[in-house]
């Protein structure tokens, strides 16, 4: 039966998280380098990070990665790995650029949001690569499968600092 009632739009949920850690890496197997702030360039990536450097060689360097310019990860996942699997993973070990707290990232796929002064669009979940076990020396691939990061396209660039907010548009 056809309803004559107007469709009710569900508003986007309000959320606020906070940036806890920032990292970049110049090459696939080099250690992540902690940063106090990172500079995101719209449509390109993070200044000094391997995905903005066109000469990167190694894992996935030959794949065009639309939306892979910055990757987020949850502090809550690090807590869950320790609690559920007795695996201590440091923020630099998960190989993502930004570690946030307070927002379930899997709910942001397909949404736009602010990270500090930058505008991002979450394109897909970032499933971990098997080589993360080789890099960290820990059996973390299986526990991370259901706790992935979030790949985001940079729509408006700027600076992101530790303590900045992650909030909805």
Image (spheres, rainbow, N blue to C red):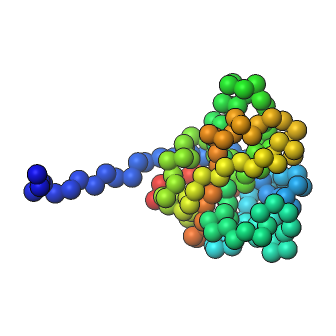
User: Position of 27 compared to 80: left or right?
Assistant: right
Residue at the spot 88% in from the left edge and 51% down from the top edge: 31
* Residue drawn 82% across the image and 48% down it: 131
Q: Position of residue 41 (x, y in %)?
A: 68, 71
Is residue 157 or residue 26 the one in the foreground? 26
Task: Return the x and y of residue 2 as percentages of the image width and height.
Answer: 11, 55
- Where residue 6 sits: x, y (%)? 16, 57
- Residue 13 position (above or below residue 85): below
Q: Which residue is drawn at 47% across and 54% down?
A: 168
**In this orientation, which residue lies closer to the viewer: 95 or 166?**
95
Quarter of the figure with residue 53: bottom right
* Residue for point 56% across, 60% down: 123
Relative image position of residue 129 (x, y in whole percent): 75, 50
**Eyeballing the image, is 18 above or below 140?**
below
Count of numbered labels shown in the rendering: 0
Rendering quarter of residue 133: top right
User: Is residue 105 visible in this depiction of the protein?
Assistant: yes
Is residue 155 or residue 142 the one in the foreground? 142
Taking 166 as reference, is 2 left or right?
left
Whether residue 117 is visible, yes or no, is no
């Amino acid at each position: 039966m056809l309803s004559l009632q107007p469709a009710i739009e569900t508003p986007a949920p309000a959320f606020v998280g906070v940036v806890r850690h920032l990292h970049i890496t110049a090459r696939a197997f080099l250690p992540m380098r902690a940063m106090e702030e990172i500079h995101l360039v719209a449509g390109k990536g993070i200044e000094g990070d391997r995905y903005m450097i066109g000469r990167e060689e190694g894992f996935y360097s030959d794949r065009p990665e639309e939306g892979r310019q910055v990757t987020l990860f949850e502090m809550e996942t690090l807590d869950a790995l320790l609690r559920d699997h007795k695996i201590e993973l440091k923020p630099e070990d998960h190989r993502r650029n930004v570690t946030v707290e307070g927002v379930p990232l899997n709910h942001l796929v397909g949404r736009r949001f602010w990270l500090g002064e930058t505008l991002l669009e979450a394109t897909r979940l970032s499933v971990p690569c098997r080589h993360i076990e080789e890099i960290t020396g820990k059996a973390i691939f299986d526990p991370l499968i259901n706790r992935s990061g979030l790949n985001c396209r940079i729509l408006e660039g700027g600076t992101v600092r530790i303590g900045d907010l992650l909030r909805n548009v």
